[in-house]
Image (cartoon, grey):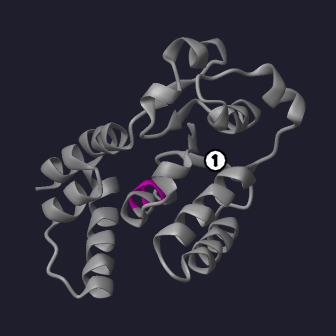
Amino acid sequence: MKLLLDTCVLYPTVMREMLLGAADAGAFEPLWSAEIEGEWAHTAEKHAAGGRVFAEGEIALLHARWPNARVRYGEGLKARLWLPDAGDIHVLAAAVAGSADAIITLNKKDFPAQILAEEGLSLMDPDAYLRGVFASDPALVTPVAERVLAKARELSGQGWTMRSLFKKARLPRLAKALG
């Protein structure tokens, strides 16, 4: 299954690490575009000094891990598409060009189901998706969650619990499932 990752699930870090960890474990094939990468770097820059440089480094690492994940599309495709927020058309264009099955995003209102269905796409909430993967294969998600938790503890110096970290990361259903 191919899933287009919107900017809002690539930045913040914990959500990105969980989704891409699941992809690494074979749950799905991730897709994104240069424009999504640019939004990620811009958002990181707004939130932290040196954020753009860090994001660009992360993006370079993702290119090495998934060399075919960056989708390219033409302006003609973007011109034929419509969404309530014109600023999100590039996300839909990338999903269509990459033959994605769905878009993973937190911005449900910006991607009407009817419009996505016309393009053969659906919308997925990252928490619901990861909770579903966990329900069907806990052995796939649990090691990813444990690595993300260990890294968060190491980098922050805080004693995060699984539940508190994933709840803060806007993954409350997954947090509850993981305990």
Q: Is residue 105 above or below residue 138?
A: above
| Residue at 39% in and 59% down | 18
Q: Is residue 32 left or right of residue 16?
A: right
Q: Position of residue 99 (x, y in %)?
A: 70, 32
Range covered by the magenta-colored residues: 18-23
| Residue at 79% in and 30% down | 78
Give the residue at mark 1.
31
| Residue at 87% in and 37% down | 74
Q: Quadrant of residue 114?
A: top right
Residue 102 lies within the magenta run: no
| Residue at 51% in and 82% down | 49
Q: Nearer the viewer, residue 74 or 144?
A: 74
Q: Quadrant of residue 160?
A: bottom left
Q: Quadrant of residue 1?
A: top right
Q: Is residue 164 above or below residue 95?
A: below
Q: How many marks?
A: 1
Q: Is residue 179 above or below residue 91?
A: below
Q: Is residue 26 visible?
A: no
Q: Is residue 178 visible?
A: yes
Residue count near mark 1 (Cα–Cα under 10 Å), binned few <14, some 14–19, many ≥20:
many
Q: Is residue 121 left or right of residue 26?
A: right
Q: Position of residue 153 (x, y in %)?
A: 24, 81
Q: Secondary structure at mark 1?
A: strand
